[in-house]
Image: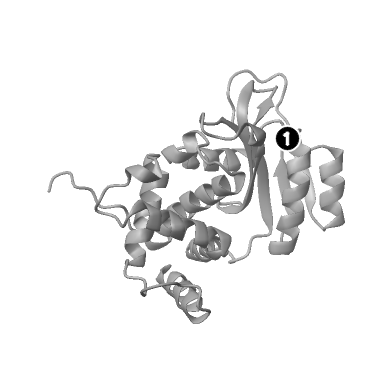
Amino acid sequence: MVEPVLTAWRNERHRKGLTIGRPPTHDLRSVLNAILYVDRTGIPWRYLPHDYPPWETVYGYFAHWHNDGVLDQLIDLTRRRVRTSAGHDPEPTACMIDSQSVKTAPTVPAATQGIDPGKKIVGRKRTIIVDTLGLLLTVLVTTASTSDSRAGLHLLTTLAATHPRIRKAWADSAYRTTVIEHAAERGIDVETVRCDPATKGFIPLPHRWIVERTFGWLMAYRRLARDYEAHPTRSEAMIDLAMIDLMGRRATGESTPTWRGT
């Protein structure tokens, strides 16, 4: 499903003369599988098994695909396929926004970290916007000290430009007046979903449970259980890859083969 996008990218680089030396010899499927292996298992790049291409080559492809917008193309492609197969329009009209603070690895530069006083976490904050199926629309990784409102302003601006059909959004009470007014100027009605103070225990809130479920999907990828990336934009790329993997498997109905029982 994604091979035409990757092949077109490689051919375009060759046409522009951006490849130096001999022509590429590594299979694009093997490279993508290696990148997903790192994302799923959480291993360092240098620990890639020798069944895959050299780790320097794999990381180089990962960096180029992120910088050249290839991952964005794959996100859009797989999301449209899933939405169409589920009987929805390819482009969504409603979304949910929420954030998650995660701890960072010791190798992460201190300048890209912060403290989330509410959750008492030193690390980074992931803010995502998903559609009504929980599929990723856009993501922003910041320091954990960044307020939800500030991240929400940035993401809603991006969302209005990339998905102009969005007219409704649900969020929690952290996204206050500024975010609501900012979204209204772009034709998006943001509705806050609040917890009932009289309710005890855990109860899924309307609409908000969808984005919380997406965070649960992402936590199955061990590279995302803690932020290991030196640059926040690389963290965003890892989240994109996890969602590409999830949506690709959902769109095709295929699952990862296992060696057990063979």
Q: Position of residue 24 (x, y in %)?
A: 36, 71
Which quarter of the rendered picture does the N terminus lie within?
bottom left
Residue 86 visible in the picture: no
According to the image, label 1 marks what residue? Answer: 146
Q: Residue at x 33, y 42 (%)?
A: 47
Q: Residue at x 72, y 56 (%)?
A: 158
- Crowding at mark 1 (Cα within 10 Å: few <14, some 14-19, many 20+): some
Query: Taking 206 as reference, is 183 above or below it?
Result: below
Q: Residue at x 35, y 56 (%)?
A: 33
Q: Position of residue 167 (x, y in %)?
A: 75, 57
Question: Quick check: 11 left or right of 175?
Answer: left
Q: Position of residue 110 (x, y in %)?
A: 62, 31
Disc 1 is placed on an element classified as loop
Question: Quick check: 252 left or right of 194?
Answer: left
Question: Quick check: 142 left or right of 23?
Answer: right
Viewer-proximal residue among 50 and 224: 50
Viewer-proximal residue among 118 and 14: 14
* Kind of residue at disc 1: Thr
